Amino acid sequence: MIDFACKSFKLERVIRCGLGLTIADFKVLEFLLKQDKELDTKDIAAGITVNLSTVQRAVKKLAEKELIQRRQENLDDGGYLFYYSIRSKQHIRNMIMQIVNAWVKKVDTELRKW
């Protein structure tokens, strides 16, 4: 828990809010953080017990936000599979700290105007 004045926040909530993630997005991110290999969407869905379309939306969003990376594997008989993995926990921490620091700067600016 993180206390701020009269309110306490769970770190998960700060991360979700700061990065603009849904609960499902965060579950996928958290699951991938614990993995030591690339996974496809079916493996991720099975690992966190959510439906495939939810995982597909989540990995698209997480990749767009550059929180995870995607690798395409072309299949011998045509088609392809995407595999996903976390970029790095440090990269994500840095992103969150930039967001938090920007918020602190904005609060400071507003307090100075007040």
Image: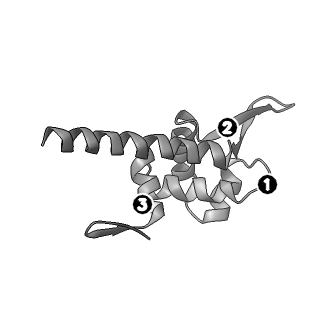
Q: In the rendered picture of this protein, how many numbered marks are placed on residues?
A: 3
Taking the view exactly as shown, the residue that stands out farthest to the front is 112
Location of residue 42 in the rendering, given as x and y in whole percent from the top left corner: 68, 53
Category of crowding for the residue at label 3, using alpha-carbon neighbours closer than 10 angstroms: few (below 14), some (14–19), many (at least 20):
some
For mark 2, what is the residue?
69
Mark sitting earlier along the chain (1/3): 3
> To which residue does mark 1 refer?
36
Residue type at the position of mark 1: Asp
Q: Secondary structure at mark 1?
A: loop
Three-letter code for the amino acid on which mark 3 is drawn? Arg
Asked if disc 2 and disc 1 are in contact, CB closer than 8 Å, the reply is no
In the picture shown, does residue 18 fall above or below 51?
Answer: above
Callout 1 crowding tier (Cα within 10 Å): few <14, some 14–19, many ≥20? few
Alpha carbons under labels 1 and 3: distance apart? 25 Å
Q: Position of residue 89 (x, y in %)?
A: 65, 49
Judging depth in this view, the residue of 44 and 8 nearest the camera is 8
Left or right: residue 102 versus residue 83 is: left
- Indicate the amino acid at tag 2: Gln
Q: CA distance from mark 2 to mark 1?
A: 13 Å
Residue 22 visible in image: no
Q: Tell me which residue sits at (27%, 43%) in the image.
A: 108
- Residue 96 appears anywhere in the view: yes
> What residue is disc 3 on?
13
Figure quadrant of the C terminus: top left
Labels 2 and 1: the sequence-earlier one:
1
Mark identifier at residue 10 = none
CB atoms of marks 3 and 2 within 8 Å: no
Judge by depth and name the residue closer to the eye, 50 or 113: 113
